[in-house]
Image (spheres, rainbow, N blue to C red):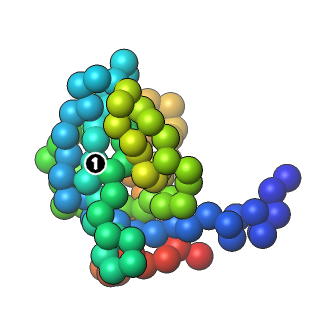
Amino acid sequence: MPSITDFANFDIRVGRIAAVDEHTAARKPMYKLTVEFGGEIGARTVIAGIMDRYSKEELAGKKAVFIVNLDPKNIAGVESQGMLLAAEDGATVSVLVPDRDVAIGSKIH
């Protein structure tokens, strides 16, 4: 079982999804998200496999929760620089969002 120290190694932040594009080179339906984290992190590209669950309009401008310190991963020719966090319950997927208006770049503890 992971320890609290293991969890503390993840840098989890609030980001604002600034742009949503289809990642047409991917085998599965995926979005290429441009996410703003502000100050020290800036903008990042994150590939997310939620295209069949969310429309572009539902995601654009949304603040959501991301892991920002994972090793970059090349997904069908595009470097993903983080991971969008979401809950899944069978066919239902819910992107994790802060329940209050916090600044982009805010750390999740």
**From this viewpoint, which residue is outermost toward the top?**
27
How far across and how far down the image is residue 47, in percent? 37, 41
Residue 13 percent location from the top left of the image: 46, 69
Give the residue number, with chain letter if any, for mark 1: 33
Q: Residue at x 77, y 69 (%)?
A: 4
Tell me where residue 3 appears, x and y as whole percent: 82, 63
- In percent of width and height, residue 90 lies at 50, 31
Which of 41 and 102 lies nearest the eye of the viewer? 41
Residue pushed farthest left? 57
Q: Quadrant of residue 44?
A: bottom left
Quick check: 6 left or right of 98? right
The residue positioned 29% from the left and 63% from the top of the image is: 43
Badge 1, how many Cα within 10 Å: few under 14, some, many 20+?
Answer: many
Q: For residue 65, what is the image quadrant?
A: bottom left
Identity of the amino acid at label 1?
Leu
Considering the numbered disc 1 on the image, is that residue within a helix, a strand or a loop?
strand
